[in-house]
Amino acid sequence: MKSLLQKLTQTPGPSGYEHQIRDVVENEIKDLADAYWIDNLGNLIARKGSEGPKVMLAAHMDELGVMVTHIDEKGFVRFLPVGTVYPRTCLGGRVRFLNGMTGVIGAERQEDINRVPSFDQLFIDVGVSSRDECPLQVGDVGVFDRQFEDLGRRVTSKALDNRIGVTVLIETLRKIAAENIQIPQQVFFVFSVQEEVGVRGAPAAAFDISPDLGLAVDVTGSGDTPNGSRLEISLGKGPAIKVRDQGMLSDPRVVQWMVQTAEQHGLPYQLEVLPRGGTDARGIQVSRSGVPAGGLVIPCRYVHSPSELADIEDAQNAVRLLVELLRSPFNPEGTEERSG
Ligand code: CO
Ligand code: ZN
């Protein structure tokens, strides 16, 4: 699992430019799915099974990045963030553009050296001394450059959000195929685009699939660092079942089904109540005439920084729980017309 995660984190895929990461994912799933296709937005959708209720599992492939807005006469590159990037995590960092060019993020002089500069005051230095020498153009995109490191049970890299979710989906599909596990439903594994810029890919996929149930597989924050956020989530205590985030309230029936399944199979889980953030689950939930939706999220520290850190066992337990969830279909009361 770690080597797949390493490969996925090190393949660039800023929002809207997911072609490289999609090629890698396609290669991993093409022999495992019954069918797969790529929709007009670039979502990669793999189907397993052809009978029973339709379950959509979504993990976004895109990652945070930068886009060139301006290049000055001396060749310094100004940029906008792609997705929710914080200036404080940019300092001292490097970016790698899709054309292979690397740059260092520099900042204008600050009167107060303890102040965090704004994006307006940041620039990228690609090592040239004039605009003519600069191999970039306005509109070029790049990602943060940070290696994957295996720390033992834990790993750190850029883009664990959400390549760890992508890894969980691939490994779930692989386990079902390898062990020939019978799934009494149609499962659509969606590797979605443009989540980081406001959940733009998943709703299109949900319209296409028209699922009976939708789950996002993504990361969540943790509250187990010094003076950290007040979150009841720790690394290594299992994946978290989403109860709410800023963008959605999970369907309580979905939460209950997930909790019961985890308990029946003795699998560790935590409950996620997150004041900020959102996932593809929100996009699925409000698609078409509404879809029962929830999420399975991997605890992660330093989310949206170039050095995110997670526990690989949480991802392995997420695969185990997903397989059990797919084996025991969610059966809510129907939405048929009722009469008294
Ligand atoms: Co994110
Ligand atoms: Zn994410």
Image (tube, rainbow, N blue to C red):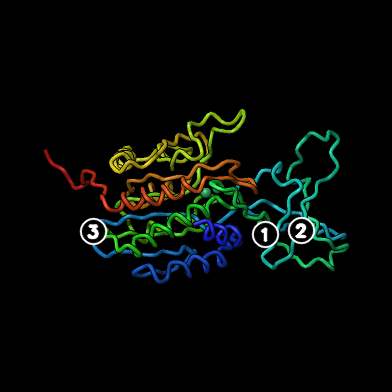
**Looking at the image, do the residues carrying marks 3 and 1 touch, with CB atoms under 8 Å apart?**
no
Q: Which residue is mark 3?
A: 52
Badge 1 element: strand
Image spot of residue 284 (x, y percent): 39, 50
Question: x%, y% of residue 44?
Answer: 45, 64
**Distance CA(mark 2)–CA(mark 3):** 50 Å
Relative to 227, is 65 above or below?
Answer: below
Q: Nearer the viewer, residue 151 or 36?
A: 151
Q: Earlier in the sequence, mark 3 or mark 1?
A: 3
Name the residue type under label 2.
Answer: Gly
Residue at 64 percent across and 54 percent down: it is 65
Q: Is the residue under label 1 in contact with that under label 2 (CB below 8 Å)?
A: yes
Q: Does 222 appear above or below 137?
A: above
| Image point (52%, 52%), residue name | 162
- Going by the numbered disc 1, the residue's amino acid type is Gly
Per the model, the C-alpha gap separating discs 2 and 1 is: 10 Å
Residue at 41%, 64% (x, y): give it.
Answer: 45
Q: What amino acid is labelled 3 in the image?
A: Gly
Q: Position of residue 151 (x, y in %)?
A: 60, 48
The residue to which callout 2 is attached is: 103
**What percent of the width, then of the height, locates residue 46?**
39, 65
Q: Earlier in the sequence, mark 2 or mark 3?
A: 3
* Quadrant in which residue 126 is drawn: bottom right
Front-lying residue, 38 or 318? 318
Q: Decide which of tag 2 and tag 1 comes sooner along the chain.
A: 2
The residue wearing badge 1 is: 142
Q: Residue furthest left?
A: 340
Helix, strand or loop at mark 3:
loop
Q: Which secondary structure, mark 2?
A: strand
Q: Badge 1, how many Cα within 10 Å: few under 14, some, many 20+?
A: many
The residue lying at 77 percent from left, 51 percent from top is 105
